[in-house]
Image (cartoon, rainbow, N blue to C red):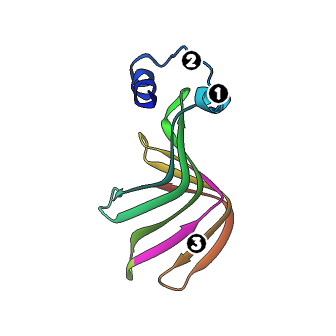
Amino acid sequence: MVAVLVAASLFTKQILWTPITAINMKDVVSNQFKMTNASFAGTDKDNNPFKIHADIGYQQYNKPNIVFLEKPSGKITRTTKDGKVTDNITASKGQFNHKTRILTLTGNVRVNSSNGDKFLTEEMVLQL
């Protein structure tokens, strides 16, 4: 039944729900797609690898290009004049726009780089 509801949402973007007491209807209506232990990997525009993980990843009907992330972490490799550097990054929340390939991290953003650099900030925006 859940598979039918998910598939229907992809085609119609609107579903008439029959209330079931075990389901949080507010969560179902506001979130188009939700998964735990979400991970995705790829390469950036410079062909450097990246991998992002989140405790929870979800999409909303009104923002189909954005994946919202709860407790994201990941590894991003970048090329500098001194060679390749791997950044280990964690944050409280994040948003990944898969159309523009922009990752926005917010809340207690920590970066530990393989070259010894470390920093803490409240917001970080990356073009992947």
Amino acid type of disc 2? Answer: Trp
Where, quadrant-wise, is the C terminus in this rendering?
A: bottom left
Magenta stretch encompasses residue 89: yes
User: In the rendering, which numbered label is found on residue 111?
Assistant: 3
Label 1 – label 2 distance at C-alpha: 8 Å
The range drawn in magenta is 85-94
User: In the rendering, which numbered label is found on residue 17?
Assistant: 2
Label 1 – label 3 distance at C-alpha: 37 Å
Mark 1 sits on what residue?
A: 25
Q: Nearer the viewer, mark 3 or mark 2?
A: 2
> Furthest residue to the front?
21
| Category of crowding for the residue at label 3, using alpha-carbon neighbours closer than 10 angstroms: few (below 14), some (14–19), many (at least 20) | many
Amino acid type of disc 1? Answer: Met
| Category of crowding for the residue at label 1, using alpha-carbon neighbours closer than 10 angstroms: few (below 14), some (14–19), many (at least 20) | some
Residue at 39% x, 63% y: name it: 50
When the figure is inspected, residue 104 is found, relative to residue 67, above or below; the finding is below
Residue at 40% x, 30% y: name it: 3
Marks 1 and 2 close (CB-CB < 8 Å): yes
